[in-house]
């Protein structure tokens, strides 16, 4: 039986779900946020804990004062909370607090690039966010595991490439869940394959960790996840914290990515003795508030239950798909009927430029969605069927309107009622395209005509 989240108490956990916002006609409606894959709103328990901690807040690791010790203790204890959340090894792993996933992967790429090994290949994939592609490029030979015609990762191609590179793959660097299509990758199967061929695995957990349970598994297991990165702001905890987890010994050697105070043991003008990890990789004043927010969010999500969260969000996904598919002109860019997914849906409404639809949805119904390539350009280019020639054209002609998609993504607090409103306005737009294109095309820049906004053939050819 399908779980009905409409009456869920979970909404009460979230700040701002009843916030009124203005429409283009001046009326106010309750804001609907379907852009949770970008960032999530704030949990009440997180803000309460921030307030609770604020009188005790002081410099971490620096002062001898009482509050400084309290702040340092809370910050350090945060590592254990993170470890038990993802079942990382308390003896052998280190939890490094970062700004976000992007910084975490940059740190890892810098650290691994200093290791003296013959393994110089990183196997990334076609579905990676720029955060898990660009940091590898200038330090390693990077190759990309293929996706099939629905955009799903090809495990066969992964194994082929692992065989072809014959022991020189250092790392398989893969997203746990796609921020474009929502597909959940089989990370344990991928880990087992990587280990079978002598490589390690990094899971970019930015989209996975907030939506389903993740287990790094023991070091003895073939399915062990060697490195994991994720961001607090995607799990209802702003304040700028992120996480990188990996074997402590890997961070002992070499120089840290960010260098400065806090990362050092002893320094002269000739010599630097680095601190031990994690301190070594956390130069500068640590983000105590961010860690309080993150650990409170983790405890709150654990008390709700990660499996329960997955189930709720999957119900929302199924519900949205079952209604969207009946709207004329909707084109999906992923297999809508898959099972293993977080609740992310990429689509276009035929005849309405992807850049225009979010404005219409916001100004007409107070619904927030996102459009474009979602910092995942090669994957979106592939899903839209763009050739290299097409892309070069966009590189060269700045006035050319970029193709793209619209994305909706749900959080644990969204409900069927909100989806009903979305479906209803989407249907109205689909049935009155000319009217809405004409009304909103003025929002595009002056050299972008109404024809381009709605009816550009070039866009259609590429799945707009
Ligand atoms: N990886 C994935 C899959 C993402 O979706 C994102 C952000 O959208 C990132 C990495 C980067 O996360 P952050 O911006 O928090 O560093």
Image: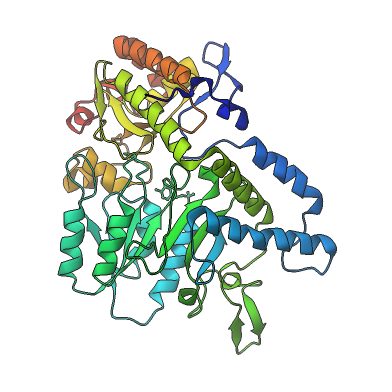
The image position of residue 228, as x and y in percent, is 44, 59
Q: Is residue 174 placed above or below 372 in the rendered structure?
A: below
- In which image quadrant can residue 149 be found? top left
Q: Is residue 334 visible?
A: yes
Image point 28% across, 58% down: which residue? 190
Can you say whether 226 is above or below 423 in the image? below
Quadrant location of the N terminus? top left
Horizontal placement of 94 versus 284: left or right? left
| Residue at 55% across, 48% down | 232
Residue 353 x, y percent position in the rendering:
31, 26
Taking the image as shown, residue 241 lies to the left or right of residue 179, namely right
Percent x, y of residue 77: 65, 60
**Coloring scheme used:** rainbow
Judged left or right of residue 31, residue 434 is left
Which is more toward the observer, 106 or 304? Answer: 304
Q: Nearer the viewer, residue 332 or 276?
A: 276
Residue 143 place in picture, x, y as percent: 24, 62
Q: Of 41 and 89, which appears nearest the observer?
A: 89
The number of discs equals 0
* Outermost residue to the bottom: 270
The answer to whether residue 438 is seen in the rendering is no
Image: 216 above or below 331: below
Quadrant showing the C terminus: top left
Residue lying at 16% horizontally and 68% vertically, measured from the top left:
163
Which one is in front, 47 or 24? 47
């Amino acid at each position: 039986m399908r779980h009905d989240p409409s009456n869920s108490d979970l909404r009460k956990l979230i700040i701002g779900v009843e916030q009124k916002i203005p429409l283009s006609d001046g009326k106010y409606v309750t804001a609907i946020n379907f852009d949770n894959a970008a960032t999530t709103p704030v949990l009440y328990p997180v803000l309460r804990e921030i307030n609770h901690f604020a009188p005790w807040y002081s410099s971490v690791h620096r002062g001898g004062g009482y509050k400084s010790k309290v702040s340092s203790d809370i910050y350090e204890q945060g590592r254990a909370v993170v470890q038990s959340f993802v079942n990382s090894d308390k003896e052998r792993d280190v939890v490094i607090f970062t700004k976000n996933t992007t910084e975490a992967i940059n740190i890892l790429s810098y650290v691994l690039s200093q290791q003296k090994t013959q393994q110089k290949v990183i196997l990334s994939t076609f579905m990676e966010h720029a955060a898990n592609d660009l940091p590898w490029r200038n330090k390693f030979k990077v190759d990309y595991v293929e996706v099939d015609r629905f955009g799903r990762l090809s495990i066969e191609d992964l194994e082929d490439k692992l065989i072809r590179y014959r022991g020189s793959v250092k790392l398989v660097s893969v997203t746990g869940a796609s921020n474009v299509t929502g597909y959940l990758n089989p990370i344990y199967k991928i880990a087992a394959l990587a280990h079978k061929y002598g490589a390690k695995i990094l899971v970019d957990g930015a989209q996975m960790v907030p939506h389903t349970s993740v287990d790094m598994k023991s070091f003895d297991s073939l399915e062990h996840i060697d490195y994991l990165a994720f961001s607090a702001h995607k799990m209802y905890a702003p304040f700028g914290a992120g996480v990188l987890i990996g074997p402590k010994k890997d961070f002992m050697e070499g120089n840290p990515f960010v260098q400065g105070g806090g990362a050092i043991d002893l320094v002269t003008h000739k010599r630097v003795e680095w601190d031990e990890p994690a301190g070594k990789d956390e130069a500068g004043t640590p983000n105590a508030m961010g860690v309080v927010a993150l650990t409170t969010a983790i405890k709150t999500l654990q008390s709700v239950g990660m499996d329960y969260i997955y189930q709720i969000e999957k119900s929302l996904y199924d519900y949205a798909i079952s209604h969207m598919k009946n709207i004329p002109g909707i084109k999906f860019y992923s297999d809508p009927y898959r099972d293993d997914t977080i609740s992310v849906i990429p689509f276009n409404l035929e005849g309405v430029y992807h850049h225009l639809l979010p404005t219409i949805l916001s100004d007409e119904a107070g619904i927030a969605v996102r459009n474009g390539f979602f910092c995942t350009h090669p994957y979106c280019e592939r899903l839209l069927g763009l050739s290299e020639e097409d892309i070069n054209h966009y590189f060269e002609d700045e006035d050319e309107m970029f193709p793209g998609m619209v994305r909706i993504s749900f959080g644990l607090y969204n409900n069927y009622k909100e989806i009903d409103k979305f479906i209803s306005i989407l249907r109205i737009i689909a049935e009155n395209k000319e009217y809405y294109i004409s009304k909103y095309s003025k929002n595009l820049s002056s050299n972008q005509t109404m024809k381009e906004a709605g009816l550009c053939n070039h866009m259609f050819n590429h799945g707009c």
